[in-house]
Amino acid sequence: MGAATPVVELKQITKRFPGIVANDAISLQLRKGEIHALLGENGAGKSTLMNIVFGLYQPDEGSIEVNGKPVIIDSPNKAIDLGIGMVHQHFKLVQPFTVTENIILGSEPRKGLNINYKKAAAEVQRLSEQYGLKVNPHAKIHDISVGMQQRVEIVKTLYRGADILIFDEPTAVLTPQEIKELMVIMKKLVAEGKSIILITHKLKEIMEISDTVTIIRRGKVIDSVITSETNPNELAEKMVGRNVTFKVDKKPATPGNNVLEVSKLTAKNKEGISVLNELNLNVRAGEIVGIAGVDGNGQSELIEALTGLRKVDSGSIRLEGKELSNHSPRHISESGVAHIPEDRHKHGLVLDFSVSENIVLESYYKAPYTRKGFLNFDAIKKQAKRLVEAFDVRTPSIETKARSLSGGNQQKAIIAREVDKNPELLIAAQPTRGLDVGAIEFVQKQLIAQRDQGKAVLLISFELDEIINVSDRIAVIYEGQIVGEVLPEETNDRELGLMMAGSTQKRGTVHE
Amino acid sequence: MNNVLKWFTRDSFILPIVAIIMGLILGGIVMLIGGYNPIEAYSALFTKVFGDMYNFGEAVREMTPLIMTGLAFAFAARAGLFNIGGEGQFLVGMTAATFVGVKFAGLPIYIHAPLALIAGAVFGGLWAAIAGYLKAARGVNEVISSIMLNWIGLYLANLIVRQFLLLKGENRSVDISDTASISLTWLSELMGNSRVHMGTLIALVMAVLFYIYMWKTKQGYEIRAVGYNPNAAEYAGMHVNRNIVKAMFISGMLAGLGGAFQVLGVFQYQTVMSGSPGTGFDGIAVALIGLNHPFGVLLGALLFGTLTYGSAGMSFAADVPPEIIRIVIGSIIFFIAAQGIVRWVLKPFYSKRKKEKVL
Amino acid sequence: MDLLTIGQIINTTLVFATALIFASLGGIFSEKSGVTNLGLEGFMVFGAFAAGIAAHYAQEAGMGGTTSAWMGILFAVVLGVVVSLIHAVASITFKADQIISGIVINFLAAGSTLYLVKLLFEGSGDSPLVQGFSKFDVPLLKDIPLLGEAFFKNVYPTTYLAVLFVFLTYYIMYKTPFGLRLRSVGEHPSAADTVGVKVRRYRYVAVMISGALAAIGGAAITLTTTGTFSHNTVSGQGYIAIAAMIFGKWNPIGAFGAAVFFGFSQAIRNYVQLFEWSQSIPQEIIYMLPYLLTIIVLVAAVGRSSAPSALGEPYDPGKR
């Protein structure tokens, strides 16, 4: 990498939003044929920066040069014309359309007034073969796997002639095996002359595949280093600004009796397919069981069954011996089950309610919060104040609408509410999703604190690292069943990845 | 003093006021185009309503059913539901009240009148609950089902009047018994012999009850939660479907009560109607102007009633077709609904105020 | 009941269905692009109004009955497009609640058309009677038993136009780039945006098309069945058209079928006297039929799962 002109150069890019400077004089160089990682935690400004490169936002200050020429990228169309393509974290795919329709959207080949579908499919086929991206041109998006959906996103950019590809957190939804496949694809793209910007917060992947890393924190570039000359600890420290331990600080668990016993749990969906397939699972008091698995293998359905939102067709759910399956959510909650939902905006909070109204979301109907049908605002306020203080929920007042709180503080409010119920079983679904490192630490500490107090904790997460670091015991879910149970200190990514993908090879028989 | 000022300059207060002013101006422009004098027209309108006791009383009488249908829409809206069926619920309630008022003669007044009112409320509520049930159980969009029920309600009302309550030779029902009437003769005399009735007082009480129920009780909390976020409400253990049906029922009750007032308080009989009276739809306008808040509804009904009642004066004194008022009202709602337009107009004034978001 | 009567019932059904077909096609364009359009009723009212006025003045100016009728259609389209811009601006640019905006359109339609009619015609609530479209027969085909009576005899050009538009809509939606992009905007506007499809533009166009089509539907009523415009002319058909669209799962062919079904429920009102047992049914029940049927159909139809995913949500590019 000599003094060749960078393929893309960002010079002093600054972007402001009301109340925040998302990008602060950021400069970055992408050389031809390199994989350049952009590292930063949630909210650091990576997505904003890439949206600027892709023409969705305009910088307030600074300039962009492509192949040495200054350009103004004022729309995605312009970016596409310049050869910049983006593979989004949340796929921009139209579900009922076919793979081909998604790829050609906006640049459809014509035959007179019609779309020339034959030509389109042929082109998709050609690209697919050239770059080793297996896709089925005629399948509908809602029928194909997540891995294939991502490949469709990639082909979309190639179809429009992209030479510069931006990957936004591409591995968030993939199994370890699929991640490996993606790495192969990226290497092939680079071999064919493409240049890649990889946005991620996964240090392992950066070390494995990138050539250069630029670290961003709070909108500013902290450093730009050559990957082979650094290590994960150094990167993490630059990313967060202080010393970061990877291992979560915890004493060994001393589990007691079974609190939760799930046996042969079966539930069918509308089409009659079993989404839970004779699932067996135990969680004991004083332990954290982590459920690892690729999204869509029954995690959500399991949680729904446990919390009373889904009917089970057979099998049983026992909490300390009491049968809970097919009871109402309220009954289950009152029996000692607390739940931190994976989608805090959809299920965890009423955003237009105040913080205090949200704090009593599950207890408003009981004394002292309700007396003779009327709400007792004094009691509600007292409770809200107490919890906000105890759990350090940052809010101007307890009457502020939940909508105005940051993601981390919203999550803290939910955790405060759930933990205060003093449950026997705490279910935490994707509890650290979208949170910054400080909030993540807080949440994980809370889970461990609950476990130390003798509660049973069930953790469901797509972040394998989190599962490995926080759990005392790992259960892998695949197609509605628990297909394996391992201890975190005795397993590794590869073994877990295999189990998550359905391979039934158990421990001890794994070969490199 | 600062607090009062703050409350008055709140978004939720300024917005409707500016929208109203913009609507009146737009109406004025339309009048100018039609060759009419807007100043003359608006002053004729004002004089008509506030000029003398009789007219004021009649204007109040006209506002009363609007309060009820407005409260009806606002209540359902708080539960996240668009109850466009106020029209049908109004008529069904009216019919039920007429039926009781006619058929249950011989009861003492302190039983008969309340019974008729309750009948009106209950049947209006049931009519709305149909749409609520269809939504909760079958996911049927309540906008369309309630509109269809409006038409069915109209024909049903006519059917019952014609089949069971008809005054021979006429196109209306027989009069209700005196014991079912809720008109207030002493107040009427006080107000120039206008047809004021107890319904107005009941309507005011209903607005207060609405406020207390919605924001001070556990049931109101549930309805609001379901309205804002049914998913979270379900997760928290609330019965979403039950609340939907309940909210529609209460909403229909309010509309039905409004219909009952018309017969029991004003006309003392019910006509066979060739078309829907439109009170239900006007209630939607009132609720939107009042931003779906019970006290806003009272103000909205005041405005709406003033405009519509006064429009007759406008047509008489300044020769302006009364339909102009519907354009004024439509524009007001439009400006409220498309708040963006009002904010855009107010941008120069807003730049002094800064909104802060907690990070 | 003989073949002749059956044929006539089909014929009448199609006449009543015509307005519904146009309006539901309009609804499909708008909703497929993600904009809820409850204002179809208002657009139909404006269209019926424009047709009544334009046809009247055209007749007065000496143009023949049919030419005046086509003038009526033309003006209906123009007015429909103009009024739909109000809904478009409110919902798309100012991100107003689309349901409320639609209902407001209906309010404005009722009020302003009546105002203008009274203004133009000395306080009368009805526009003057116009000749409208004349029925015609298709040579040769009209003599086929049953089919001739049903489809080729005593037919209005508007009915044929409606059927033509059904196929046109299908073609545009599913075979052309415009249709693909429009549908993408309604399903996943952010996906469309990132490939350079201008979400707002497509939604504006879709809403304007819906205004035009619904207005033609309203015009068809004035120019075929009633001959005049009054506040009673449309009476709920815009809402029935929405139900037809839902019942037809937002597909033009499906909506066509549903519109015919609802047209039938209206047509049957004219023919029910033929049945002896109908004498004992109060007339109100007969009048209720189309609306009752609509509810039954909505309950039976398998949910709204086929609605465009982004329906009713204003697109905010800032929210990424």
Image (cartoon, rainbow, N blue to C red):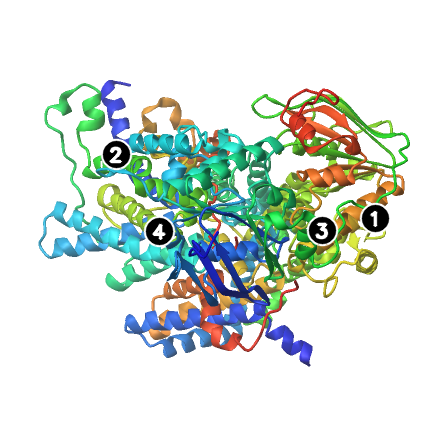
Q: Name the residue under label 3.
A: A411
Of marks 3 and 1, which one's residue comes earlier in the chain?
3
Q: Name the residue under label 1.
A: A420
The chain that hosts pointer 1 is: A
| Residue C178 shown left or right of residue A385 in the figure | left
What is the distance, in whole Å, between disc 3 and disc 1 at their CAs? Answer: 14 Å
Q: Which residue is drawn at 55% across and 51% down?
A: B259
Instruction: Give the amino acid type for the residue marked by disc 1 in the picture.
Output: Asp
Say if mark 1 contacts mark 4, CB within 8 Å: no
Check the picture and name the quadrant holding the C terminus of chain B: bottom right
| Residue B188 shown left or right of residue C115 in the figure | right
Say if mark 3 contacts mark 1, CB within 8 Å: no
In the drawing, what numbered circle is on residue C163? 2
Which residue of the protein is positioned furthest toward the front in this rendering? Answer: A2
State the image coordinates of residue C177 (x, y, percent, origin top left): 31, 41
What is the distance, in whole Å, between disc 2 and disc 1 at their CAs? Answer: 64 Å
Q: Is residue C56 above or below residue B335?
A: above
| Residue C235 shown left or right of residue A423 in the figure | left
**Closer to us: mark 4 or mark 3?**
4
What is the distance, in whole Å, between disc 4 and disc 3 at their CAs? Answer: 41 Å
Say if mark 2 contacts mark 1, CB within 8 Å: no
